[in-house]
Image: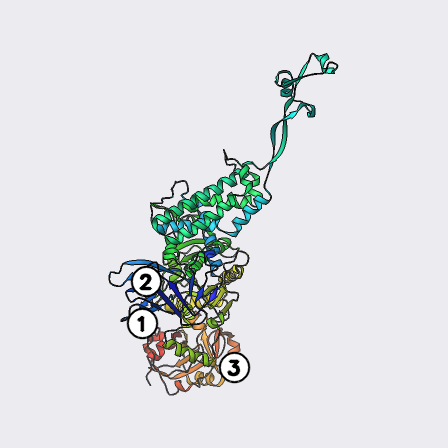
Amino acid sequence: MKTVSNIEINLDSIQKGLRLWIDARRSDSLFDAAENASVHNEARFQLVEGCSYDFQISDPGFILGDVGQNIIQGHKRTTNLGTIMPNIFVGTLSIPLLEKETLRECCKVELEVQSIKSAYREDYRDMLELITEKCTDLLLQASSPVSQYFGIDYTKDSQTLYQKFSFIKSLIGTEEFAEAIHRIVKAPTTKWAEAEEEKDIRNARRFSNSNIKEILKRGNRTKIPEKHYLRSYGLETLPERISTIRKTDSVDTPENRFIKHALENFLKFSTDINNKAREFGHKKMENESELMIRELENQLHHSFFKDISRPTTLKLNSPVLQRKEGYREVLRVWLMFDLAAKLIWTGGNDIYSGGKKDIATMYEYWLFFKLLDLFQSIFEIDPKDISDLIKETPDGLNLQIKQGKFTALRGVYYSRNRKINIRFNYNRTFSGKKTYPNSGSWTTTLRPDYTLSLWPYGISEAEAEKQELIVHVHFDAKYKIANLTDFLEQNIKNDLDEEKVENKKGIYKNADLLKMHAYKDAIRRTGGAYVLYPGDRSINQKGFHEIIPGLGAFPVKPSKTNSGIGELKAFILEIIEHFINRASQREKIAYRTFDIYKNPPESDNIIKEPLPEPYNTNRDLIPDNTFVLLGYYNSHEQYNWIQRTGLYNFRMGSGAGSLILDKETVSSRYLLLHTSGDTSSGDLWKIVSKGPKVYSKDDLIKKDYPNPSQNNYLVIQIEPVTDTEFKNVSWNFRKLENYSTGRASAFPFTTSLTELMKNKIS
């Protein structure tokens, strides 16, 4: 393939001297593939996706027609000039050449658009082969509707027919299939066969019963000499020649008959496709089917097949067909062939239509099956959901996988400690502007390619969403990511400045990264968002200390030997182990989120009064969760003792005025003191002990407590509050909800700092 800066396409067949010139705007983006274009069934002149090209038609009376996606952009005044911008299109671009006045189509100019990925042809072939294999595997399941017969309807449109042909081509047009036939021809299975021939009776060594009959009755006889010993047995003549049986090594075995029968059926299918391609005018399918026909004819013309007869039965359970190299591969293709020919895939329109090879969409579909295999190896996927991937339609057996169409598979993960519900979603839409606690996105509607959701077994998904018990992990397929370093690694200042300039031009290098952030930050209960791309390097960035929440990328390549799916599997298993851990930070955050947001805030729950800032030792100072004990002292002597010792005592027991040790009391941070006749108090102390201690009457006497009347007391240690926000401040404690009047006004009770500050006086 030769790199050129411009090309000239001869259109003499339309009008003598008519030419189309195309110039590349970027070097190394225009090629003349005259030598090898036919090998790949591609057009001779080749462009590169994402590049721009200028074109000119020699005669202003002709223009290039529209092919969609704004690929052809004609000049507004001089219409025989313009620009070709393939954008993300990959494959054969058939551009109609039109008469300007009548808009009559004169011909189609075919250009090939290459992918920026150098190995896209092999990737496309390998991915289509795996998709075909997985589809037929689904059809072979007992629960699939395979028993219903569907013939191949060649009256359908050419697009559906091309889709079916592409499936079949991915089976019989591979190097593996050609190698299987070569192995059979090189080392076929054989059997001993008996061949009858006439032999001079003098050279015969062994006689059968039929030979003895020939000795007596066969014609063309010769007299025996008079003295020959056979005369004594009454024989006077012997036949000159006699029939004998010779054993030969024959290739005409049931297994070889099957191989020939399979190739002949494949050839008939390809011939039928070729005829219909001519009828529909589908040039690409016609060329591809012709290549297939030539390949199959070359295989059948081998001398090996000349001595093989037609089969009377197909012994598909033959050990040779099932085990021997070459034979087992052809048998597998044969079993898949009939099903693949009857399969319809509406999603295939995304990658077949118009001759394009939408490699990025193909990668997305291919990844679905790779992830399905991965999750089936880890989880118990509901068999019904698997079988529902293939459904019976009026046109045949339809694969229910389509870009933009929601597909969900449910399952369970079993461990010794915890059972987990899982759901694998393809193209799940998370609706936007959803109010809490509803599932979805709180901003705009988002649709990740794949979502793995996990929540505890025995709880409905809706309930798990409401109680913050579910985790979503999203994956997006990105076939065309070229440089993973640009995707996730930190940019230096110059890079960021350059990116701002490119953004003004409409170029967004970090668009994929921003989308991962959008998934993680906008879709509620998202644990992580990750890119899957056909590279060789992974990145897994943790949001905090644990594996999720996080962002990253994992390489998954269309390779039969080393796809990289193992690293992704290890990551999924690590997420599961993390989810099983009941002491994880994520579990704590999930509960705090649920506890805080389960109810909307009350409209009057507002504090704008000065409070100590929540940092260092006060970092956990949240007014709603900070509690204040209200304590009573009945004399100046008792108050002086409190000031002198830094202790405050409560009654114990079940009597009136005893301290109730509830959660608020034990965790109280402050003590507000008051005495008889007070309507407000500013006597705030800080509780410094970890909890109340039990003191006996004697213990308090030793500390000079004035006149203890109870046998035991609960005692806390306190110190004066030093925060400036609480200086010269008093509160009307009688307005607090837990305050009681009368004799009960001396009973201890708790309040939140929020409620206390709402009753601030000064």
Most extreme residue toward the left is 101
Q: Which of the marked residues, 1 or 3, is nearer the chain's N terminus?
A: 1
Residue 231 in view here? yes
In the picture of the structure, the residue carrying the numbered disc 1 is 602
Residue 554 in percent (x, y) is at 49, 64
Between 284 and 685, the residue placed more toward the observer is: 284
Is label 2 in a helix, a strand or a loop?
A: loop
Residue 703's mark? 3
In the figure, residue 465 lies in which quadrant? bottom left
Nearer mark to the viewer, of 1 and 3: 1
Residue linked to disc 2:
68
Residue 284 position in % (x across, y down): 40, 54
Q: Residue at x 36, y 81 (%)?
A: 676
Q: Nearer the viewer, mark 1 or mark 2?
A: 2
Taking depth in this image into account, of 413 and 189 the one nearest to the observer is 189
The quadrant of the picture occupied by the C terminus is bottom left
Asked whether, in this view, residue 255 is left or right of residue 438, the answer is: right
Residue type, numbered disc 3 = Lys
Q: Mark 3 Cα within 10 Å, few/some/many (few <14, many 20+)?
A: few
Residue located at (65% from left, 26% from top):
199
Q: Position of residue 114 (x, y in %)?
A: 43, 63
Label 3 and label 2: CA atoms lie apart by 94 Å
